[in-house]
Amino acid sequence: MPGILISYVHFVEAMNRRVGKFAMYLLFVMMAIMLWSSATKIHRVPAIWTLEMAQFTLVAYYMLGAPWALQTDANVRMDLLYSRWSKRGQAAWDAFTVFALMFYLGVMLWGSFDSTLYAIEYNEVNPTAWRPVLWPIKSIITFSFFLMLLQASAHLIRDIATLRKQDI
């Protein structure tokens, strides 16, 4: 494999690993928000922001962690035949199916980017009592789809290297 492709794979995987490790800690942020929500209910102090903020944090946790999950093969795979195949057979199948994933991610990236631009342009807010602006969470979703697309392309390069009996 050309050195630039190997560097690309290493860069994308290092970036997704860092983002994924950051995302792990968002679970603690969500727990703190829910703990605050419980504490305010005990003292009968309304905290109208806690439910939505916990939801936004969960979305960020899930979306920012997804590229790292794809990288580490932590995703769910229908494994009727796949585990019986050789490494090269698995790589061939992955190289074939990654195009469906990349198409899906491309469509989702395009839609989320368009939705983010709309949220910024019109200062879109959630129609609830708290009325938070939506562009921050939509930006995170868009960024996550971009990272997933990069990770899928890195997977494709790794699969091609495996088919060529090379190691990255």
Image (cartoon, rainbow, N blue to C red):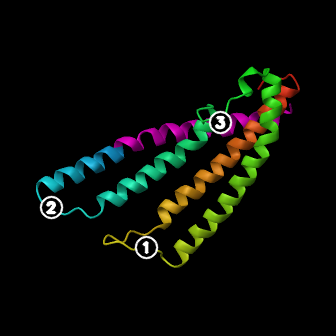
Asked if residue 167 is among those painted magenta in the image, a careful observer would answer no
How far across and down, in percent of the image, does residue 90 sit? 78, 28
How packed is label 2: few (under 14 Cα within 10 Å), some, or many (20 or more)?
A: few
Q: Is residue 24 left or right of residue 82?
A: left
Comparing 143 with 6, the one in front is 143
* As drawn, 122 above or below 28: below
Answer with mark 2 or mark 1, whichever residue precedes in sequence. Answer: 2
Q: Give the residue type that dot 2 points to.
A: Val
Circle nearer the viewer, 2 or 3 = 2
Quadrant housing residue 55: bottom left
Outermost residue on the bottom side: it is: 122
Residue stretch in magenta? 1-28
Q: Which residue is labeled 2 in the image? A: 45
The residue under the point 17% across, 56% down is 41
Q: Which mark is residue 13?
A: 3
Place residue 109 in its image quadrant. Answer: bottom right
Nearest the eye: 100 or 37:
100
Q: Residue furthest right?
A: 164
Q: CA distance from mark 1 to mark 3?
A: 34 Å
Residue labelled with disc 1? 125
Q: Which x, y percent locates residue 77?
A: 65, 34
Q: Circle 1 — which element? A: loop
Q: Earlier in the sequence, mark 2 or mark 3?
A: 3
Residue 50, picture quadrant = bottom left
